[in-house]
Amino acid sequence: MKTLVVYDSVYGNTEEIAKAIGGAISGDVKVLHAGEANLSELEGIDLLIAGAPTQGGRPTPAMQGFLKKVSGPAIKGISAAAFDTRISAKWVGIFGYAAGKIAKNLKKKGGNLVLNPEPFYVKGTEGPLKEGELERAAGWAKEVVKSKITG
Ligand SMILES: Cc1cc2nc3c(=O)[nH]c(=O)nc-3n(C[C@H](O)[C@H](O)[C@H](O)COP(=O)(O)O)c2cc1C
């Protein structure tokens, strides 16, 4: 199975999550920053996992740029899942979050969402991640693969 994990990260926390996700999946797995992930990287993949920090209720500009590059034909019928990092304070929720917006974008273009968008939590703007989030990311990645296989 060929998997591409695409992420953006300003302070490094989402990068850590992306690497934990990539590390938990077997087969041919690439973990790429959104700025490095060209359309050609999507060729022949079975699973796309995309994640970004939530900033102002949305994915960061680099992830938005990646999503703009992803055309319908490149993603149509490919299994996909989205994640984000965010702060758990309740007041920030009014703006929404990155993961749901990434998932919606991929779905609109014909991607086949295999699991609900997943949040991972930082303790403050620059991190660090809350305890246990890397382990939870690895577990989530395995669930994504399982859901893809069982459909
Ligand atoms: C300009 C800015 C806006 C942010 N807006 C939100 C927000 O709307 N909701 C939220 O939960 N966290 C928000 N955060 C916190 C980020 O989600 C947090 O910095 C990020 O998860 C860290 O990931 P990174 O280390 O990969 O950059 C914001 C942070 C910055 C710098």
Image (cartoon, rainbow, N blue to C red):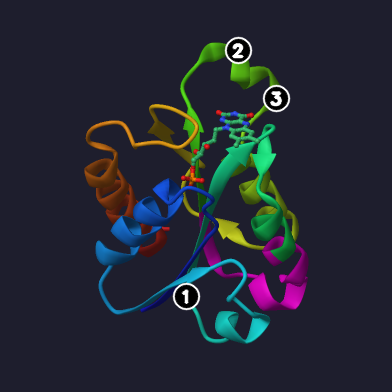
Name the mark nearer the viewer: 1 or 3. Answer: 3
Write the residue at 42% across / 56% down: 15
Write the residue at 56% across / 83% down: 41
Report the side of 42 relative to 58 (left or right).
left
Report the side of 84 relative to 97 (left or right).
left
Q: Where does label 2 land, which residue?
A: 91
- Camera-side residue of 16 and 137: 16
Name the mark nearer the viewer: 2 or 1. Answer: 2
Report the side of 150 relative to 10 (left or right).
left
N-terminal label among 2 and 1: 1
Identity of the amino acid at label 3? Answer: Phe
| Mark 1–mark 3 distance (CA, rounded to whole Å) | 32 Å
**Ligand 1 quarter of the rendering:** top right
Q: Relative to 123, does residue 120 appear above or below in the rendering?
A: below
- The residue tagged with tag 3: helix, strand or loop? helix
Q: Which numbered circle lies on residue 94?
A: none
Identity of the amino acid at label 2? Answer: Trp
N-terminal label among 1 and 3: 1
Q: Residue 25's image quarter? A: bottom left
Pointer 2: residues within 10 angstroms few (<14), some, or many (20+)?
few
- Camera-side residue of 130 and 80: 130
Q: Which numbered circle lies on residue 46?
A: 1
Residue 69 belongs to the span the image colors magenta? yes
Across and down, in percent, residue 75 comes to: 65, 71
Across and down, in percent, residue 100 comes to: 61, 40
| Mark 2–mark 1 distance (CA, rounded to whole Å) | 37 Å
Identity of the amino acid at label 1? Answer: Asp
Q: Relative to 4, does residue 109 appear above or below in the rendering?
A: above
Write the residue at 64% across / 80% down: 38
Q: Which residues are magenta?
A: 66-81
